[in-house]
Amino acid sequence: MRLTRSLEGVVRDLREPAGLHLPGASPLNRVGLQPYRAELEAFAVRLGDLERPVTAVGLAMVGRFLTDGGSPLYDRSNVDSLPQTVESIRSALEPR
């Protein structure tokens, strides 16, 4: 649930009006992530669905996604890889 809450926090930050945050207050690439907001929201819903089991590998990938500075969430030069990254993680979350 901690990972879900963290991902929901990212989505919440993206919903807030531009200019609400001071520059540099967070390393989150808010501007670059806006086009992917719906994808991140759907990802947070899936992660938070307690009726559907997830794999340990998938959870580890979510953890890296949320904390690694090279993640598309933070690395402005890597933001375009977000759809592929999220899809990879979602796939890894699903038990086989």
Image (cartoon, rainbow, N blue to C red):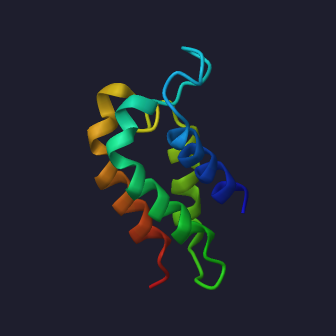
Q: Quadrant of the N terminus?
A: bottom right
Examine the rendered structure and indicate whether residue 47 appears above or below residue 52. Answer: above
95 w.r.t. 86: above or below: below
In the picture, measured across the screen, residue 30 lies left or right of residue 64, that is left
Image quadrant of residue 72?
top left
Q: How many marks?
A: 0
Q: Residue at x 52, y 43 (%)?
A: 15
The spot of residue 9 in percent (x, y) is 63, 46
Task: Using residue 6 as the reference point, say whether residue 23 is left or right of it.
Answer: left
User: Can you say whether 12 is above or below 22 in the image?
Assistant: below
Nearest to the observer: residue 32 or residue 72? 32
Rendered residue at 49%/82% (across/down):
95
Position in image of residue 75 (x %, y %): 40, 28
Looking at this rendering, what residue extends furthest in the top direction?
23
Say which quadrant the C terminus sits in: bottom left
In x, y percent, where is residue 78? 32, 33
Kindly give the residue lying farthest to the right in the view shown: 2
Q: Horizontal and vertical percent for residue 30? A: 45, 32
Give the residue displayed 50% in from the left and 46% down from the top: 65
Horizontal relation, residue 26 to residue 87: left or right: right
Q: Quadrant of residue 79?
A: top left
Name the one closer to the observer, 42 or 88: 42
- Front in this rendered view, residue 76 or 38: 38
Q: Residue at x 39, y 39 (%)?
A: 33
Q: Quadrant of residue 80?
A: top left
